[in-house]
Amino acid sequence: VHKYLGGSGIGARILWDEVKPETDPLSPQNKIIIATGPVIGTLFPPSGRYAVISLSPLTDHWGEAHAGGAFGPELKYAGYDYIIIEGKAEKPVYLNIEDNLIELRDASHLWGKNTIETTDLICEELGDIDVKVACIGPAGENLVKYACIINDYYRAAGRTGMGTVFGSKKLKAIAVRGSGGLKPALPEEFMKFSQECFERHSSGEWADYIKKTSRTYGTTGLMDAMNAIGRLPT
């Protein structure tokens, strides 16, 4: 943790150590890592995002996608920093996590459903509307190479085909419910630092740009900025 901090850093190390570079991204030998960072689920801005890491079926190389919403924090409240999924199920399944309870459930009745239907049906099946669900739709099931993982109905881990890797493993969804909490080692200092960071992020030229573009256009509002710093793949 001290060397790689958390989230994407540790996820990258796990993938490097455990998956050979020549591995077919759609094979059972590939692994998919759901990763949270050290401040996820706290008041630190922006601490709601989790990462999904695997070999990408789109590029055959490193793949990483991020999503916001409540799924990442809920995973932390259940007591987990990372989930590593490997192998392949014989039939469609979903992973259900309720604190210390971890089980694979049949998802044959969910296969073919879109992500909204899947989320609703899992919450109904588990008898809890507050279950947080990350799932794939028909695109991931049919191995479209850029398929997303959707959580909280509208949040997307949308890059590098991570939903396709879910589909290759017959993994329809991950459902999480946690009852725990997080407490910083130094609560007062952490609150003060979080407030300082929030004030920095909410003022200045970059904050003005975000308010004018991202809030109106979403991720597409970042195109000019990402192009300027060489973050686009073309």
Image (tube, grey):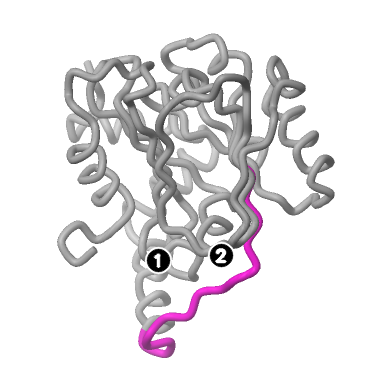
Name the one closer to the observer, 96 or 216: 96
Residues in magenta? 175-189
Label of residue 166 in the image: none
Q: Quadrant of residue 53?
A: top left
Q: Earlier in the sequence, mark 2 or mark 1?
A: 1
Q: Which residue is mark 1?
A: 39
* Amino acid bearing label 2: Tyr
Which quadrant is home to the N terminus?
A: bottom left
Is residue 230 in the magenta section? no
Q: Which quadrant, please, contains the C terminus?
A: top left
Residue receiving disc 2: 77
* Residue 179 in magenta stretch: yes
Residue 151 seen in the current view: no
Q: Residue at x 37, y 62 (%)?
A: 201
Magenta region, mostly helix, strand or loop? loop
In-image side of 67 versus 204 (left or right): right
Amino acid type, label 1: Val
The x, y position of residue 61, in whole percent, is 23, 22
Residue at (51, 52) in percent of width and height:
72
Residue 142 placement (x, y as % from top left): 55, 9
Measure how far apart labels 2 and 1 are at the Cα level.
12 Å
